[in-house]
Image: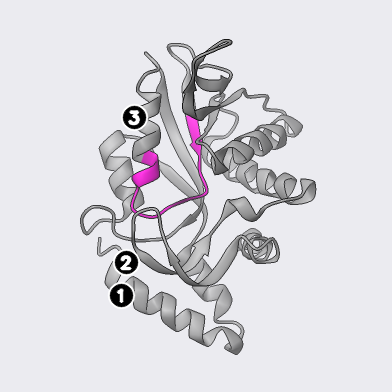
Amino acid sequence: MEQYKREFIQFLQSAGVLKFGDFTAKSGRKIPYFINAGMIKTGDEIARLGEFYAKAYFDKLGNQPSVLYGPAYKGISIAVSAAVALSKNGLNVPFFFNRKEIKDHGEGGVFVGYVPQAGEQVVIVEDVITAGTAIRESMAILSHLEGVKVAATFVMVDRKEKGQGEKGAMQEIEEEFGFPVYSVVDVYDIIEYLEEDPANEENVTRIKNYLAVNGAKV
């Protein structure tokens, strides 16, 4: 396993972002582990998270300019921290996010921050994709921006789960909307990391059993 992946998984655990137990995903699935970006609560933690996203961005997109979009609520802090990290490394990009409720006073509207113009490219930054529900919601919101194209999506973890069919949720998103979805690590990286310590045997078994049912077959 690459060192940065190991460091990222260690970071997720130390920050309480990666947890094991019984949870319900946004898709409604009962899952044995949970990725919760809302657990990041300090300046150091959000700065480190942004650095990992920036590394993934440069690895996949290079110095390609874009506008970062962070879906409310967890994506907001990710977009801000990633934009700061990119800026520190020489790529100054604008960012924006959505309101859950449309503002009917002041400047109004559903978006906060920079509003992309026709011809500009947007990169969505999310915490995780399970069945693709949240990304489809984001695409519905972004569809109101005329002439704006989504270039890619970045997430913390590829859960390697089925989407609406047998294919992986991330693969379905790529085929449905025509842009790539990248992750810093995937669930098999997490399994590999956990297997290094026998104390994690129960969690490893539960995740593998879950993937046997819900894992992507293609």
Q: Quadrant of the N terminus?
A: bottom right
- Tags 2 and 1 in contact by the CB under 8 Å rule? yes
Which residue, as the protein is rendered here, is positioned at the far right?
44
What residue would you read off at disc 1? 212
Q: Amino acid at mark 1?
A: Ala
Res. 178 mark: none
Q: Nearer the viewer, residue 57 or 212?
A: 212
Q: Residue at x 63, y 44 (%)?
A: 55
| Helix, strand or loop under label 2 | loop
Q: Nearer the viewer, residue 39 or 50?
A: 39
Q: Answer with left or right where residue 208 lies relative to residue 74.
A: left
* Magenta residues (range): 123-135
Compared with 17, 65 (above or below) is: above
Measured from the top left, where is residue 76 in percent x and y? 59, 36
What residue would you read off at disc 3? 140
- Density class for disc 1 (Cα within 10 Å; few <14, some 14-19, many ≥20) is few
Cα distance in 3D space between marks 2 and 1? 6 Å
What residue would you read off at disc 2? 215
